Image: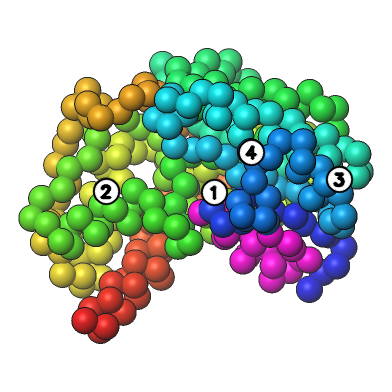
Amino acid sequence: MRKDRRILIVGSGGRLGAALLRIFGRDFGVTGLNRRQLDLATGDRMDDLLEPLDFDLMINCAAQTNVDRCEREPAEAFALNAEAPRILASVCSRKGARLIHISTDYVFDGEKSEPYTEEDEARPISVYGESKLEGERQVLADGGNHLVARVSWVFGPDRPSFVDWVIDQALAKDSVAAVCDKFSTPSATSDLAFMLQPLLASPLAGIIHLSNRGACSWQEYGQWALDCCEAEGLPLRARSVGAITLSDMKQFLARRPVYTVLSTAKYERVTGAPPRPWQEAVRDYVRESVVPRCRQSVAGE
């Protein structure tokens, strides 16, 4: 294990945080704090919890990510997604540490038809997006060499996501449907960890976009996942994903941006390493995580 980097991961109980804790723990000295150990809602009291800890890099994966809850509870959204990152950035600067803050594609309004770059104006259309954008501003206003990393449609083995839902539906039911007119890029937590690794010791500050390569709708994403499951011999009841539209989703309280594909051109210029296509990442996830889980479940019945 390399001791030259001491990493603190805030939000280590979440989908991305848990993956970073597991993957970076192989090579670095890593400490993880989940919500029970560090609650962003405690505000300035986080100072007392963080002060004794020894780290030179913090990665903040914690946030209120329930888009509709943010719409119902805007004060909570801004406390967790904007004020808490301000405090974390301040703590890092005081300790001489760097902060990598994880943000979201929802800071954009979705009006473009080509991938968003870091230079594009952020114009969120939901409280969730507004609170995350304010969190970005607070982190970057701190003055340290902090980095904001925007990600999209994150999936991985540590917590279920859309890809797990659509596969479980197809295993249990004769039909499944997903939104066909909303577009972004599925991003595997393992790939995001790989993309973050060369940035850990980099002096790069500001904003960077991280995702797998390509773009798809939720329907296309789900269909590819089912195709991968069928190729692996899983006993699907539904083999195709039907189409519904965003306007059909009457239960949604907050507006969702229609197109939030993130350009990774800046990342590729900085590192020389293009991300792999989202299809490859989903295929590997099905093989390595979904298939073993499903077969274990069948064996346990």
Q: Is residue 254 above or below residue 210?
A: above
Label 1 to label 4, Cα distance in Å?
34 Å
Residue tagged 2: 222
Give SS at disc 1: loop
Give SS at disc 2: helix
Residue tagged 3: 97
Q: Which residues are magenta?
A: 15-32
Category of crowding for the residue at label 2, using alpha-carbon neighbours closer than 10 angstroms: few (below 14), some (14–19), many (at least 20):
many
Amino acid identity at mark 2? Gly
Label 2 to label 3, Cα distance in Å?
40 Å
Tag nearer the camera, 1 or 2: 2
Q: Which quadrant holds residue 256?
A: top left
Does 26 lie within the magenta span?
A: yes
Label 1 to label 2, Cα distance in Å?
21 Å
Q: Is residue 162 above or below residue 288?
A: above
Question: Residue furthest toward the bottom?
Answer: 299
Label 2 to label 4, Cα distance in Å?
34 Å
Residue tagged 4: 41
Q: Earlier in the sequence, mark 1 or mark 3?
A: 3
Amino acid identity at mark 4? Ala
